[in-house]
């Protein structure tokens, strides 16, 4: 798919994210908007998936380890055709398949439940091992937060992936430099992320996480790497695309009010 | 009881896994640097390509198992009970139990009979932790024969499960004809005066206690409650109801384990005088397994004494 088309999907995803969060009245816009371009490139270009067969054994998998960015994943899945787009309006409502954090038992297209930070890469390890045992060639993509990299389990998982040479794992760090209580380097610095991941045995690239072409190129390059897992540090802006949300820690976990939804949508027109 | 060969349930576990390796190609085993102690090394010896050492990193190990299960594998993960269920509790909750993934957590060195390593290594809370999780099946086999069958049944069963195993060699309570059925408690000895519900190695202790009681003309029922969840409510209600008195015996805290589970059922269905025999809000300590069982009141004599006290309550009603 052409990169322009992917960019169009990314914009439509952002509009859906804003609308669904406006309707739900709670949720996480900042980290959803920073991860949007990565998810758009994966679902509308990079990943081998078939929305009519969500449990297809040969599909690529995606684990949204930073599960609070669920609205971005849901927007991608709906636009891809896993479920009706109108269902996005049910985000976080009682009985909805669109839970506050992704639930693989409820929503088709969700490859792993998430929401408790630090656990996604471990599940990816298991999926990649299973793929190797079964002689399958699927890739397992993971999206982590930069604050999430403070979790010890991430580094247990990093060690495991490198030790077992899981070269079908391609993980992203959504490097928006913010977490709930402020700047990641003020709260508890996980930096230098690139050096850390490299020293843990990973192939590491660092890119502009809002540049579709760079995301696509980095994925292609990661697939060339053998016997080593790949990490892509995606430099991003939390709240990307909505002027009053960009780089604002206060928009981590607050839903926009009606008037803010209107303004955001006009900016994303 | 006749003197039979003592075997640790962990030994039976390793052997059962190794046996299953040939027939169940989906079986994958993970360990956290304790494979010689948990006996998963037996599986590694025959199926090295399906054995993965996760290193001393239990949280990741549980997540890896979740990912394997999400792709159709049947992972058994092992460590000591304290680390498997304690260190990785929230990983079990959110990555295994909630998404209902087919992960079997088979943990050894449960209870105080770990012995000399002391309280840091003696898990007395694991049944409680696992029992409280929705979707989780909890099995505590009484002996090697039951362990072998439970491993096979759990490998065939789809869904998260916790299998609690011991380090110590313990007596056999079942014979070769025994048929393990998940969720069905086993009446080992029928009696009239009190029902003794036990799990794990305490089943053998309960049988011995019943012998001691018989010498005093007290007739005790002994039930092996190998599946703590789903609990065999009917067996609990029937046997406690028939005897009009009951006790539970477990090598676990009296909070949250077998005793609590039975108390819940009895309180709601059939109130009879009841006592929980187990570890009473204390940590363990170093010592030989036998010495510890004595100090913590888990010997046949101690169990018989507790049983008599409950019977006295019944008779004074
Ligand atoms: C284990 C765990 N601890 C705490 C939280 C609460 N929490 C949700 S989002 C978040 C901050 C995440 O920051 P980051 O990983 O940088 O994500 P992003 O900036 O992309 O939103 C926290 C602490 C959680 N979900 N899981
Ligand atoms: Mg962040």
Image: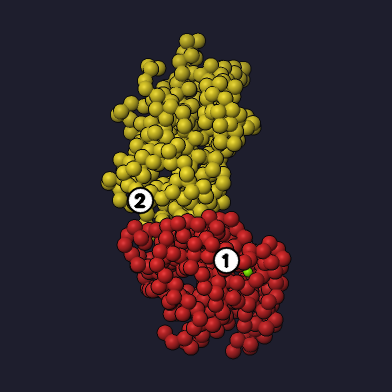
Chain colours: A red, B yellow
Q: Are marks 1 and 2 on the same chain?
A: no
Question: Dot 2, crowdedness within 10 Å: few (<14), some or many (≥20)?
Answer: some
Where, by quadrant of the figure, is residue B161 drawn?
top left
Instruction: Choose between B153 and A123: the one closer to the eye.
Output: A123
User: Which quadrant of the figure contains the C terminus of chain A?
Assistant: bottom right
Residue B5 image offset from top left, x and y in percent: 37, 22
On screen, residue B193 above or below A185: above
Instruction: Choose between A84 and A55: the one closer to the eye.
Output: A55
Q: Which residue is mark 2?
A: B50
| Residue B99 visible somewhere in the drawing | no
On screen, residue B71 above or below B158: below
Residue A195: mark in rendering:
1
Disc 1 under 8 Å from ligand 2? The reply is: no
Disc 2 under 8 Å from ligand 1? The reply is: no
Question: Dot 1, crowdedness within 10 Å: few (<14), some or many (≥20)?
Answer: few
Instruction: Choose between B195 and B46: the one closer to the eye.
Output: B46
Residue at position x 68%, y 73% in the image = A251
Q: Residue reaching furthest left?
A: B23
Distance in Å between CA atoms under marks 1 and 2: 32 Å
Residue at position x 60%, y 76% in the image = A236
User: Which quadrant of the figure contains the N terminus of chain A?
Assistant: bottom left
| Residue A233 visible somewhere in the drawing | yes
Ligand 1's quadrant is bottom right
Q: Secondary structure at mark 2?
A: helix
Left or right: B280 as drawn, with respect to A78: right
The answer to whether mark 1 and mark 2 are in CB contact below 8 A is: no
Residue at position x 44%, y 53% in the image = B65
Where, by quadrant of the figure, is residue B257 drawn?
top right
On screen, residue B179 above or below B222: below
Residue B184 image offset from top left, x and y in percent: 41, 36
């Amino acid at each position: 798919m052409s990169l322009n088309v992917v960019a169009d999907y990314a914009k439509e995803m952002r509009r859906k994210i804003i609308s669904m969060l406006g309707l739900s009245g709670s949720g996480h816009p900042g980290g959803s908007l920073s991860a949007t371009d990565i998810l758009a490139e994966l679902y509308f270009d990079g990943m081998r998936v078939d929305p009519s067969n969500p449990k297809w054994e040969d599909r690529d998998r995606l684990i949204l380890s930073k599960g609070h960015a669920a609205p971005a994943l849901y927007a991608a899945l709906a636009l891809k055709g896993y479920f009706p787009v109108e269902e996005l309006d049910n985000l976080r409502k009682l009985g909805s398949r669109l839970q506050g954090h992704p639930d693989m038992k409820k929503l088709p297209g969700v490859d792993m439940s998430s929401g408790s930070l630090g656990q996604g890469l471990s599940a990816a390890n298991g999926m990649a091992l299973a793929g190797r045992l079964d002689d399958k060639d699927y890739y397992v993509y993971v999206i982590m937060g930069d604050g999430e990299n403070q979790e010890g389990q991430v580094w247990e998982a990093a060690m495991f992936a490198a030790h077992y040479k899981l070269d079908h794992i391609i993980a992203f760090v959504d490097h928006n430099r913010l977490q709930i209580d402020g700047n990641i380097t003020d709260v508890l610095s996980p930096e230098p992320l690139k050096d850390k991941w490299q020293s843990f045995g990973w192939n590491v690239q660092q890119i502009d996480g809002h540049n579709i072409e760079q995301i696509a190129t980095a994925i292609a390059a990661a697939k060339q790497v053998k016997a080593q897992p790949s990490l892509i540090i995606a430099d991003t802006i939390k709240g990307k695309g909505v002027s009053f949300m960009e780089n604002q820690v206060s928009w981590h976990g607050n839903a926009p009010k009606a008037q803010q939804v209107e303004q955001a949508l006009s900016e994303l027109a | 009881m006749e003197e039979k060969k003592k075997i640790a349930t962990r030994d039976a576990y390793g052997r059962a896994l190794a046996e299953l390796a040939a027939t169940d190609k989906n079986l994958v085993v993970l360990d956290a640097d304790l494979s010689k102690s948990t006996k998963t090394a037996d599986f590694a010896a025959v199926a090295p390509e399906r054995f993965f050492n996760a290193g001393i990193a239990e949280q990741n190990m549980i997540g890896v198992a979740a990912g394997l299960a999400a792709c159709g594998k049947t992972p058994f993960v092992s460590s000591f009970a304290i680390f498997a269920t304690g260190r990785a509790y929230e990983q079990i909750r959110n990555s295994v139990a909630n998404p209902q993934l087919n992960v079997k957590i088979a943990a050894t060195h449960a209870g105080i009979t770990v012995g000399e390593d002391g309280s840091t290594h003696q898990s007395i809370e694991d049944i409680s932790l696992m029992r409280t999780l929705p979707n989780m099946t909890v099995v505590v086999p009484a002996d090697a024969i039951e362990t072998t069958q439970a491993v096979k049944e759990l490998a065939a069963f789809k869904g998260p499960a916790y299998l609690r195993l011991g380090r110590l060699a313990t007596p056999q309570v079942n014979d070769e004809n025994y048929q393990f059925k998940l969720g069905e408690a086993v009446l080992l000895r029928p009696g009239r005066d009190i029902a003794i519900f036990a799990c794990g190695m305490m089943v053998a202790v309960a049988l011995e206690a019943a012998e001691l009681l018989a010498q005093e003309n007290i007739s005790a029922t002994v039930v092996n409650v190998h599946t703590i969840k789903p609990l065999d409510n009917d067996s609990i209600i029937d046997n406690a109801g028939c005897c009009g008195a009951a006790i539970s015996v477990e090598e676990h805290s009296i909070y949250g384990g077998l005793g609590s589970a039975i108390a819940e059922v009895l309180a709601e269905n059939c109130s009879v005088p009841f006592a929980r025999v187990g570890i009473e809000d204390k940590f363990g300590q170093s010592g030989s397994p036998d010495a510890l069982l004595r100090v913590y009141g888990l010997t046949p004599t101690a169990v018989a004494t507790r049983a008599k006290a409950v019977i006295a309550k019944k008779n004074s009603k």
